Structures are given as structure tokens and as C-alpha cells.
Amino acid sequence: MPDKPLTAGIPVSVRPADDEGGGKGAQSLQVRLYGEDSDLLNELALEVKRRLSLLEDVQRSEEHTSEL
């Protein structure tokens, strides 16, 4: 871990509560400060796992589509 706290910008998709997929979504940015007492490594590991799972889903979908 670094000697100084880390600041991370996390992209977030936001939409009004009454939006039913009508394209009213917007992008925002959460700023998080990670210090030595935070659980940064676990959060990063979970994010990597989530993204790998998404990648596998996309690859399976592409393989299925190419077989049609």
C-alpha cells in the first residue's frame, strides 16, 4: 500500500427514479479517498472479478451469435 492515501474517481450511471429506460440517464463521478485503514484491495479484487465475469459473458454471447 502507498504511504499516502489514494483518491479514486469512480464512474457512476445515474437516472431519475421514474425513468423506465427512456434514455434519461446521465454519468456522474464519485470521488473516494482510500487510506491505510480502508479495504481497498478487497474492493479492487471484487471489481476485477466483476469485470472478468462481464468479459466472459460478452465472449459467450459473441460465440453464440457467430454460430447463428
Image: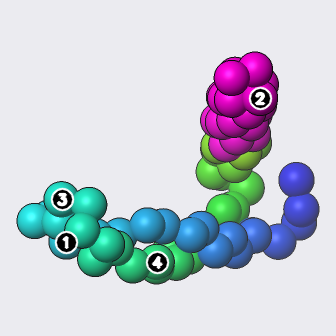
| Residue kind at label 3, given as amino acid type | Glu
| Residue kind at label 2, given as amino acid type | Ser
> Residue at left 75%, top 20%?
67
Q: CA distance from mark 2 to mark 3?
A: 31 Å
Residue 23 percent across, percent down from the top left: 31, 72
Kindly report which numbered mark, 3 or 1, lies closer to the viewer in this rendering: 3
Say the numbered circle drawn on residue 20.
Answer: 3
Of labels 4 and 2, earlier in sequence is 4
Quarter residue 65 falls in: top right
Residue 16 percent across, percent down from the top left: 19, 71
Of labels 2 and 3, earlier in sequence is 3
Q: CA distance from mark 4 to mark 1?
A: 12 Å
Kindly report which numbered mark, 3 or 4, lies closer to the viewer in this rendering: 3
Element on which disc 2 rests: helix
Q: Is 67 one of the magenta-colored residues?
A: yes
Can you identify the residue that label 1 sits on? Answer: 16
Can you identify the residue that label 4 sits on? Answer: 27
Q: Residues within 10 Å of mark 2 (few under 14, many from 20)?
A: few
Q: Residues within 10 Å of mark 4 (few under 14, many from 20)?
A: few
Can you identify the residue that label 2 sits on? Answer: 66
Kindly report which numbered mark, 4 or 2, lies closer to the viewer in this rendering: 2
Q: Is 5 one of the magenta-colored residues?
A: no
| Residue kind at label 4, given as amino acid type | Gln
Whether residue 45 is situated above or below residue 23 in the rendered picture = above
Q: Magenta: predominant secondary structure element?
A: helix
Q: Is residue 32 visible?
A: no
Residue 52 percent across, percent down from the top left: 75, 33
Q: Which residues are magenta?
A: 45-68
> Residue at left 39%, top 78%?
26
